[in-house]
Image (cartoon, rainbow, N blue to C red):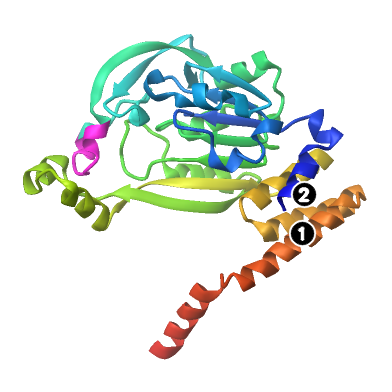
Amino acid sequence: MKKLVRKILNLPLLQNDPPVLIDIGASEELHPKWKEIAKYAICIAFDADERDFKFIEKEKSKFRKLFIYNSIVTSEPVERTKFYLTDSPYCSSILLPDEEKLKSYIHSDLFRVDRITELKAVQLQKALDELGINKVDWFKIDSQGTDLRLFKSVNNQIREKIIVAEFEPGIIDAYKNEDKLYSVLEFMSKSNFWLSDIIIKGVPRFSNELWNSTFRGGYFKKLIKESIKKAPGWGEMTFFNSFENESLNERDYLLGWVFATIENQYSFAYTIANKGADKFKNRLFEELKNSSLKEMKKQVYKLKFIPSAISFIKKSVSK
């Protein structure tokens, strides 16, 4: 499978027109899903809180080309904007944390505003225009409250051809006037995308003040925090282009197969390859179909059906 991915990315078609990746909120590390494709790709990364921007120093040589914006990325054309630096750099945002709503949750201290500053800003579409980028293939964003408005600010011609879009919107009220998970789902369901994965994450609904007064410091306290049931707080969502847009070309189909394979969406990878074979008459798509078919069959040998079988047995017994 990896050999086939490399074969595709080394094709003149992809060498001359490489994958374009956007990473908004790129403060931790190279996106694990991009490790196989990074050296073939152009990446545009944005993050304004430099207190933990290890990405620049650690990973800049991993990409074919990397553009870094140490500035706020906005949906509107402004030169500077207010920025709330929180105790945790991962919670800093252009939106004010909602302290009143957050106080019921154990992680509220992470959102405590350390200071308010004003930083330079760049409009997302303007940044793409400046770089001469007229397409985006994989859009990954964790902007702390503004994911949807930033995605919507990209030109329709670019947005409609994005192959993968990842968001991390909130479920609870963490910021004032934030883009919520349900809004992302509503907008994307009306576009040419389908939800391929969602991971709901959260923290215990337990005020930080009560938590600290109830449990004293120590390793056991951390174990309790990780053991008790968590309340849904935010979601990691991945959307795929439906490939119903007739303007998608052979390059897009090849990348779509690569991305679907990386996401372990082997059935959709097969669907893309099957449609590509009919549309472009390239024998490579038959090879891709066979590879995806083998991967689907492998899932049986890996006993991936066990959870469904157990669920079926439980339902049958309960009757």
Q: Count neighbours of disc 1 (C-alpha within 10 A) and say few if under 14, some if 14 to 19, many if 20 or more.
A: some
Q: Which mark is residue 291?
A: 1
Whole-angstrom CA distance, mark 2 to mark 1, is 9 Å
Q: Where residue 215 appears, x then y in whole percent?
A: 10, 48
Q: Secondary structure at mark 1?
A: helix
Q: Secondary structure at mark 2?
A: helix
Residue 243 visible in the picture: no
Q: Which mark is residue 307?
A: none
Quadrant into which the C terminus falls: bottom left
In magenta, the rendered stretch is 100-110
Which residue is at 57% across, 49% downward?
A: 189
Q: Where residue 126 appears, x then y in whole percent?
A: 61, 16
Callout 2–callout 1 Cβ contact below 8 Å: yes
Residue 76 drawn in magenta? no
Q: Count neighbours of disc 2 (C-alpha within 10 A) and say few if under 14, some if 14 to 19, many if 20 or more.
A: some
Is 226 positioned to the left or the right of 150 in the image? left
- Sequence-earlier tag: 2 or 1: 2
Give the answer, above or below, for where 251 lies relative to 129. Answer: below
Give the answer, above or below, for where 282 lies relative to 304. Answer: above
Give the answer, above or below, for where 175 lies relative to 60. Answer: below
Q: Nearer the viewer, residue 279 or 38?
A: 38
Q: Where residue 259 appears, x then y in whole percent?
A: 67, 46
Which residue is at 43% across, 44% downward?
A: 181
Q: Nearer the viewer, residue 233 or 78?
A: 233
Which residue is at 16% across, 41% downward?
A: 208
Is 139 positioned to the left or the right of 96 in the image? right
Residue at which label 2 appears = 4
Residue type for callout 2 = Leu
The number of discs equals 2
